Amino acid sequence: MTDMSYLDGNMLDGPLRELFAVDLSSATGRCDHCGRVGPMAGLQVYSHAPGLVGRCPACTEVMLRLVRAPDRAWFDLRGTTFLQVPMPLDQPHPGPL
Ligand SMILES: [Zn+2]
């Protein structure tokens, strides 16, 4: 890949907040390519495309794509094996009905 400048993954906080009620920048993700596990805030974010592209800081493979249109958004996590999202203790997950 070319040597383009990138933004820190912390800049994803605002755009992702529009989609999710949780702060995904504090989430931990696993790169599907190299297996690195680390904070999503540590991604290298490229904004030179129609959307935002988050790349693994270890292997530079794409882990996240986010495209925002006036009335919708596309969020693509191909390249991320999992996201581990910290949750507040006072909101237990629903049990069986
Ligand atoms: Zn990787």
Image (spheres, rainbow, N blue to C red):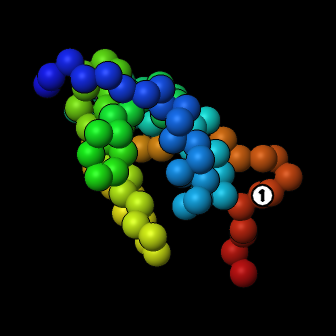
**Which residue is identified by label 1?**
92
**In this rendering, is residue 39 above or below 92?**
above
In terms of image quadrants, where is residue 81? top left
The structure residue drawn at horizontal position 26% and vertical position 45%, both measured from the top left corner, is: 49
The structure residue drawn at horizontal position 77% and vertical position 57%, both measured from the top left corner, is: 92
Q: Is residue 77 visible?
A: no
Q: Amino acid at mark 1?
A: Pro
For the N terminus, the image quarter is top left
For the C terminus, the image quarter is bottom right
Task: Tell me: 77 left or right of 92.
Answer: left
**In this rendering, is residue 33 above or below 12?**
above
> Which element carries disc 1, helix, strand or loop?
loop
The structure residue drawn at horizontal position 32% and vertical position 22%, both measured from the top left corner, is: 5
Task: Tell me: 30 left or right of 61.
Answer: right
Residues 47 and 61: in front is 47
In terms of image quadrants, where is residue 23? top right
